[in-house]
Image (cartoon, rainbow, N blue to C red):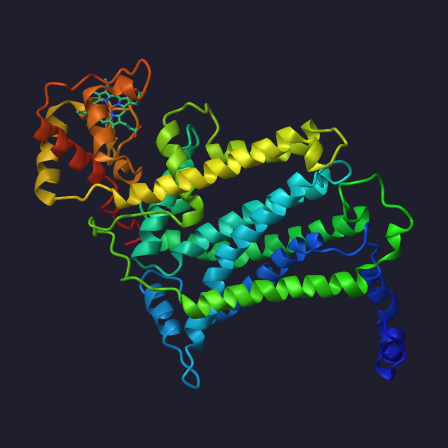
């Protein structure tokens, strides 16, 4: 610290009362192994993005009404809050909205770096685990926040998202109805999501971020992956001043990017959620696209008892306990690098496929849907499939099959020859159906779930 600041009257006053010198020295005089460097700024960037979410979130909560009757109106009101000819309301919402996407990206980058740098290895296994919890909290925050504006996008995105949870074998259906607070989305879902988003998650965030940082200060930064333990020489540089400056600039960059996006692309608000609107093409938030696409491919039970996100979670949790080799350099861990490339490539590829799929989503025509419904009932499909609580359970529940995102072609192949998709499928081949009948059946199946369930609280 600078001499003048250190000897100022304020400093002496505070030091006598709260021992500020020891505190500052504890905070700032952390040795940086290998010296200050840009590679160390990512954690601080995530931290800053989180603080920004807290601040803008509290501001929004002042004006938000968390019931289906008021949510949309209150968000619309926020969007029209002006001050000195400035759309402050929309700006704050933009910061929060883009901040959420940014957090998902930054947490991803941070995780990726820790993985590639081998920084999760002994003795940082517990810090890694806490990081995985924070990743889970981030995704849950993004997921629950998405519903709050209660517009068409929010409503249908959450229908699709919760439907995806329902596809998890064994526990999925129960999980889905617990999360929704009933069969459909309604007042209960919104208040569940609002409470989780504004009360449960922030408390957990504070707890686990504190935990993450306390461990960080106890085991110290992992340091560069090259060379063995930091030499005395390398210990000479402390957190203050150079690393503090770099971190501050990193945070500033985060703010500039989020603010820039919020100004240039302010978040939109679609029409009020309408559960009866079957012409809306429901899609999940972009960061869930790849899971959406994967679920389309891996149905049914191929993964056994585990849903895909659960499987990824388990791999991440076990990682530091399975991979015990001390080698940290990515240049000497080809498997780690190749897995990363493969996973990233797959995620991007799947997301692109999902986005392309949304454009090709079956456009419903009410006449065909109705004819398809009759065919469905006459062809004995209900003997094996349940729709809206009625039918058999040899095959999967089709109540929300229209949200899974299959193309018309996929569905028609499914009706004619199920074994093309599922080995040894017990589903009969409906090859006697004429092309237009297949079309009508596909129309009906694609409509399932695209008109909402009634709100149980009304
Ligand atoms: C004998 C029982 C049986 C009958 C009858 C039956 N299905 Fe199926 N169906 C299944 C099973 C089982 C599956 C799951 C795939 C598998 O394991 O073969 C399935 C899968 C499906 C799927 C794919 C679900 C997905 O997204 O993975 C659709 C769509 C479907 N059936 C529609 C129909 C329609 C429409 C009819 C009537 C024309 C019908 N099924 C009749 C047993 C049946």
Q: Is residue 40 left or right of residue 356?
A: right
Give the image location of residue 369, x and y in percent.
Answer: 13, 39
Q: Residue at x 18, y 21 (%)?
A: 416
Give the image location of residue 289, x and y in percent.
Answer: 40, 43
On screen, residue 396 above or below 110: above
Residue furthest bottom as drawn = 84
- Answer yes or no: is residue 360 visible: yes
Q: Write down the quadrant of residue 153 in the picture.
A: bottom left
Q: Write down the quadrant of residue 381 in the picture.
A: top left
Q: Residue at x 26, y 32 (%)?
A: 398
Give the image location of residue 399, x and y in percent.
Answer: 26, 36
On screen, residue 90 above or below 85: above
Residue toward you, 90 or 190: 90
On screen, residue 27 above or below 399: below
Splitting the image into four quadrants, where does ligand 1 fall?
top left
Q: Residue at x 61, y 56 (%)?
A: 46
Q: Write down the quadrant of residue 80 in the picture.
A: bottom left
Q: Residue at x 65, y 39 (%)?
A: 115
Give the image location of residue 421, x and y in percent.
Answer: 30, 22
Residue toward you, 418 or 207: 418
Residue toward you, 283 or 196: 283
Q: Is residue 179 left or right of residue 39?
A: left
Q: Is residue 337 left or right of residue 447?
A: right
């Amino acid at each position: 610290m600078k001499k003048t600041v250190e000897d100022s009257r304020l400093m002496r006053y505070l030091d006598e009362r709260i021992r500020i010198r020891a505190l500052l020295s504890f905070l700032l005089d952390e040795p940086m192994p290998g010296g200050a460097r840009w590679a160390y700024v990512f954690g601080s960037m995530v931290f800053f993005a989180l603080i920004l979410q807290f601040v803008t979130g509290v501001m929004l909560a002042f004006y938000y009404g968390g019931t289906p009757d008021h949510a949309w109106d209150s968000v619309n009101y926020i969007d029209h809050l002006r001050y000195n000819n400035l759309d402050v309301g929309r700006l704050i919402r933009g910061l929060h909205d883009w901040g959420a996407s940014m957090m998902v990206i930054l947490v991803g980058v941070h995780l990726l770096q820790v993985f590639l740098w081998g920084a999760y290895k002994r003795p940082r296994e517990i810090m890694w685990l806490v990081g995985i919890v924070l990743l889970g909290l981030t995704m849950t925050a993004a997921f629950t926040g998405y519903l709050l504006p209660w517009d068409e996008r929010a409503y249908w995105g959450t229908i699709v998202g919760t439907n995806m949870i329902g596809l998890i074998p064994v526990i999925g259906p129960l999980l889905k109805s617990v999360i929704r607070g009933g069969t459909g989305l309604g007042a209960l879902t919104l208040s569940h999501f609002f409470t989780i988003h504004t009360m449960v998650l922030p408390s957990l965030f504070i707890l686990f971020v504190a935990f993450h940082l306390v461990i960080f200060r106890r085991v110290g930064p992992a340091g560069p992956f090259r060379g063995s333990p930091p030499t005395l020489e390398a210990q000479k540089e402390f957190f203050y001043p150079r690393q503090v400056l770099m971190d501050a600039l990193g945070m500033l960059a985060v703010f500039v990017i989020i603010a820039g996006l919020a100004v240039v692309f302010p978040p939109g608000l679609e029409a009020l959620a309408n559960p009866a609107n079957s012409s809306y093409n429901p899609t999940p938030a972009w960061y869930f696209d790849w899971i959406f696409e994967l679920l389309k491919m891996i149905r049914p039970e191929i993964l056994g008892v585990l849903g895909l996100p659960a499987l990824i979670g388990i791999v991440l949790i076990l990682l530091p306990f399975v991979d015990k080799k001390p080698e940290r350099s990515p240049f000497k861990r080809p498997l780690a690098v190749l897995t990363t490339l493969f996973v990233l490539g797959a995620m991007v590829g799947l997301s692109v496929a999902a986005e392309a799929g949304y454009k090709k989503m079956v456009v419903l025509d009410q006449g065909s849907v109705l004819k398809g419904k009759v065919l469905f009932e006459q062809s004995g499909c209900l003997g094996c499939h349940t729709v809206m609580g009625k039918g058999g359970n040899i095959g999967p529940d089709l109540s929300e099959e229209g949200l899974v995102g299959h193309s018309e072609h996929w569905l028609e192949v499914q009706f004619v020859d199920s074994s093309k998709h599922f080995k040894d499928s017990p589903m009969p081949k409906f090859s006697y159906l004429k092309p237009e009948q297949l079309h009508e059946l596909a129309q009906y199946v694609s409509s399932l779930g695209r008109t909402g369930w009634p709100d149980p609280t009304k």
